[in-house]
Structures are given as C-alpha cells and as structure tokens.
C-alpha cells in the first residue's frame, strides 16, 4: 500500500502574523493519504533560520543549503523531524533528516544537472539502515522533446504565465527512485506529490522529501515556500 504525501496551504490567512508577542502559527503543511483513508495533515513544515535570520537563510539557500522543521501541530508543540544541510557547493548538496531526538532517519543527495554525474539532476535517497535509491529528474525522451522546442520557450513562457500555471514552460520533473531495480519512491509532477511504494520507508522521510523538492520549484510558479522575505 503506497502512501502519498504532498504540500498544501494552511487554512490560516496568508497574511496572518503574530499577535501580542505570540509567534504566528506555521502556515505550510504536508498532507498524507494512506490507501483509501481520507487525506490528513501529517506535519506542519517551517524553515529553521540560522543566527542571521531570514537574510542569512536566503543567502545560504542560493548555494543549495536548506533547513526546516516538521512539526506535529501549527503551534510548534512537538518536533517530528528536522532537515539540515550537511554540505552544499559546486552543484552538489547533501541533506540529513533527523528525528525528534536527533536520531538519523535518512539522507538526500542532490546533484545538479551538468554539475554532478549526468545530464539530468540526480537525487539519491538513503533511509537509515536501508538501501540507497537513485532517481533522475525527468525522462530522457521528454527532455529531448523539451529541448527540441527550446527556440519557442519565450512564447511558451508567456503563454504559461497567462494561463497562471507555468507548467508548460517547465522542464520534465517526474522522478522515480529505484533500489535493487524496483521503484521505491516516486515524485509526480502532476500533483507535486511523493509516493512511497516500498515498505519500510519512514513517512517522515517522505514528508521531508516532498518539502525539500518544493524548495526547488520553477521561478514561474512564484517564490518557493522557503524563500519568503518575511
């Protein structure tokens, strides 16, 4: 039975801020569907800022660094997991997902296209104590088609912006991670969700993965959730 995880907006108003010195509730969340059960809120996700605050975070993310927390509730009463950057530079970034008590849940490695080991962005997911799964962003065929129409990209971008989606101008984004020749995880671009196909994957690893992938959205969709100025 696959679990499906995706990011969604909070029911809170986008502009709601802190009142009376109380921090505003976390406004980004991860939703989960298990089998035929109704979709539920699995976690609330919030970037974890360094000592320099938002300016320091946004400067570091330009080099591939990311840091965020998965909370059990919007008021930050219980920490479920934390994603931290182990290293970032030269197009290759390594992230670690830690549990509430600092125990390792798994690692992600992102190797940017043409900067890592191939023509496509390579993502490696390694659960703690489990086999490594490797996936590549987009299929070779669809990248070929996308580049074939690259002379028309300006027109495609304009039409995408007018339609309000930006999907048509983005390159192929689907990722299938395979371990031992079998599909273990999958990111589908249609609904921006991560599917856990293999047994034994901690759902917190999937939640952290979908939140991390959404920090690398196309600029055509607007500002990524972790790149806000406030």
Image (tube, helix red, strand yellow):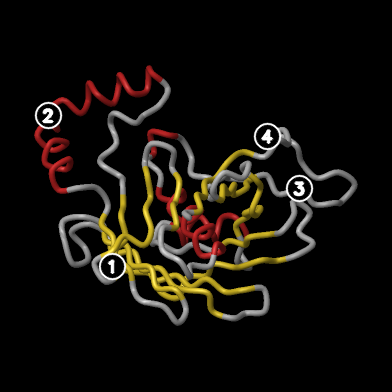
Q: Residue 51: x and y, percent?
A: 63, 68
The correct choice, above or below, for 120 with respect to 10 in the image is below
Among numbered discs 4 and 1, the one appearing first in the sequence: 4
Figure disc tally = 4
Q: Which residue is mark 1?
A: 90
State yes or no: discs 4 and 3 in contact (Cβ < 8 Å).
Answer: no
Q: Residue 39: x and y, percent?
A: 61, 42
Secondary element type, mark 4? loop
At a point 61% along the width and 74% down the height, the residue shown is 99
Among numbered discs 4 and 3, the one appearing first in the sequence: 4
Q: Nearer the viewer, residue 226 or 135?
A: 135
The correct choice, above or below, for 6 with respect to 131 in the image is above
* Residue 151 numbered mark, or none: 2
The correct choice, above or below, for 168 with respect to 209 in the image is above
Mark 4 and mark 2: span between their CA atoms?
Answer: 38 Å
Secondary element type, mark 3? loop
Q: Judge from the rendering whether residue 205 lies leftward or rightward of residue 136; answer left or right.
A: right
Q: Which residue is mark 4?
A: 14
């Amino acid at each position: 039975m696959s679990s499906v995880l995706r990011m969604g907006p909070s029911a809170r108003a986008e502009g709601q801020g802190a009142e009376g010195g109380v921090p505003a509730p976390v406004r980004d969340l991860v939703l989960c569907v298990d089998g035929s059960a109704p979709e539920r809120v699995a976690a609330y996700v919030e970037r974890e800022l360094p000592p320099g605050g938002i300016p320091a975070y946004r400067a570091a993310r330009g080099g591939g660094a990311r840091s965020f927390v998965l909370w059990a509730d919007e008021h930050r009463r219980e920490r479920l997991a934390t994603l931290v950057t182990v290293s970032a530079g030269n197009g290759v970034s390594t992230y670690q997902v830690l549990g509430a008590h600092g125990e390792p849940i798994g690692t992600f490695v992102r190797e940017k296209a043409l900067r890592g080991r191939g023509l496509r962005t390579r993502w490696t997911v390694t659960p703690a104590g489990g086999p490594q799964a490797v996936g590549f962003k987009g299929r070779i065929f669809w990248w070929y088609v996308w580049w074939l129409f690259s002379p028309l990209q300006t027109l495609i971008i304009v039409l995408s912006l007018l339609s309000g989606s930006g999907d048509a101008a983005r390159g192929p984004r689907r990722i299938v991670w395979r371990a031992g020749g079998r599909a273990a995880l999958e990111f589908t671009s249609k609904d921006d969700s991560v599917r856990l196909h293999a047994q034994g994957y901690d759902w917190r690893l999937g939640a952290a993965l979908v939140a991390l992938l959404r920090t690398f959205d196309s600029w055509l969709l607007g500002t990524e959730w972790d790149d806000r100025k406030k």
